[in-house]
Amino acid sequence: MLTSKQRAQLSSLANELNPVVFLGKAGAAEGVYEALDKALTDHELIKLRFVDFKGERKELAEQLAGKAGAELVRVIGHVAIMYRQSPDPEKRAIKLV
């Protein structure tokens, strides 16, 4: 569980990021989960853009984060920010306060 300070820190870091996963008409298909898992493994902090399902973005973002074992940092507009700490201490790029 992230604290409000950690969420603010991660949101600040995410400002410079471009979305790496896009959720379109196919919805939360298996390919989206695989892309999300790979992106979180590679980057720890990612943005997911909702191209479709904009009315359900909060619920879908929570569902995707839960399945990926990630924390949903924030949903702003049509973009969700997610964080999952790398299991390898040497690959951790983000140090939370």
Image (tube, grey):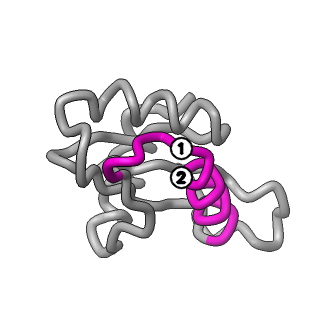
User: Quick one: SS at disc 1?
Assistant: loop
Q: Quadrant for the N terminus, please.
A: top right
* Residue at image coords 37%, 34%: 4
Quadrant assignment, res 40 = bottom right
Looking at this view, is 15 or 25 the one in front? Answer: 25
Disc 2 residue crowd, few under 14, some 14–19, many 20+, Cα 10 Å: some
- Which of the two discs, 1 and 2, sits closer to the camera? 1
Cα–Cα span, label 1 and label 2: 5 Å
- Could you tell whether 83 is left or right of 24 in the image? right
Q: Quadrant of residue 5?
A: top left
Q: Residue 70 or 89: which is nearer the viewer?
A: 70
**Residue 32: assigned label:** 2
Magenta range: 24-42
Q: Residue at x 45, y 44 (%)?
A: 6
Q: Secondary structure at mark 2?
A: helix
Direction from residue 27 to residue 37 in the image, left or right: right
Q: Position of residue 77 (x, y in %)?
A: 15, 46
The image shows residue 74 at horizontal and vertical percentages of 32, 40
User: Which residue position is annotated with label 1?
Assistant: 29
Residue at 73%, 58% (x, y): give it. 86
User: Could you tell me the amino acid type at mark 1?
Assistant: Ala
Callouts 1 and 2 close, C-beta under 8 Å? yes
Give the x, y percent position of residue 62: 45, 29
Q: Please give the label number shown on residue 61.
A: none
Callout 2 amino acid: Val
Rendered location of residue 93, percent (x, y): 63, 71
